[in-house]
Structure formats: structure tokens, C-alpha cells
Amino acid sequence: MNNAPTPTPHPKLYLLAMGAGFAGLIAWFVIGRSLGILDWISGLFPASHAGAGLMVAIMALMTPGFLLWKYYNRWIEKRLKVKGRYYEDGVYLPPKQK
């Protein structure tokens, strides 16, 4: 077993917070669906394109939810002092000089 230090001082609390955030994302979808947002947006499309209308409705409903998810993740990582590297850092950040 590897006893290397983890990038966060509270790994179990971090996982619990991520689980709560994901449950919040699921709740966002369920609340939006129960309010009829999916039916309203997909009703704007003709019946021949009902599947595409539902896909657009899900995208429109979940976009603000994923934005909140992003800010929630960053807040949790800052609060719990999570250290690490994002996968996209190698693509978007300039290469480090040695």
C-alpha cells in the first residue's frame, strides 16, 4: 500500500462534498423537469423533431446547473485546500520554463 500524502488534507470530506454537489446537480434536473421547463422548450419544436427538441431543452436546463457546479467545486477546493493539477492545465496554460 502506498502511504504517499494526498493532495488534500481532508480527502473523505472532499468526497462527501463532491457527492453532495452531484446530488444537487441531480436535484436541479428533477426540479427543472417538475416545473415543466423540458416540456415547454421541447414544445417549441415541431413533432417531427421532438427528440432534438428534448436534447436542446436538457442542454438549456442544465447549462446554469453546470455553471453552479463549477463554482461550487472551486469553492470546495479552495475551502478544503485541495492541491493538484487540472487535466486542462497542460493544454491552456503556457509551458513552464525550467
Image (cartoon, helix red, strand yellow):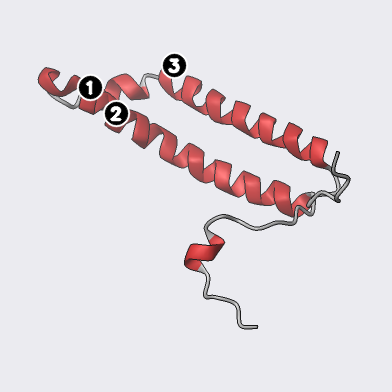
Residue denoted by label 1: 51
Q: What's under tag 1, amino acid-wise?
A: Gly
Reading the image, the residue beneath label 2 is 55
The three-letter code of the residue at mark 2 reads Met
Name which residue lies at 39% across and 32% down.
61
Q: Quadrant of residue 58?
A: top left
Taking 80 as reference, is 69 left or right? left
Please state which of residues 57 and 9 is positioned toward the viewer in this rendering.
Answer: 9
Q: Is residue 1 left or right of residue 44?
A: right
Tell me which amino acid carries mark 3: Ser
Report the mark closest to the observer, 3 or 1: 1
Q: Secondary structure at mark 3?
A: helix
Q: Residue furthest front?
A: 1
Query: Where, quadrant-wise, is the N terminus in this rendering?
Result: top right
In the image, residue 63 sits, relative to residue 71, either above or below, namely: above
Labels 2 & 1 near each other (Cβ < 8 A): yes
Q: Which residue is mark 3?
A: 34
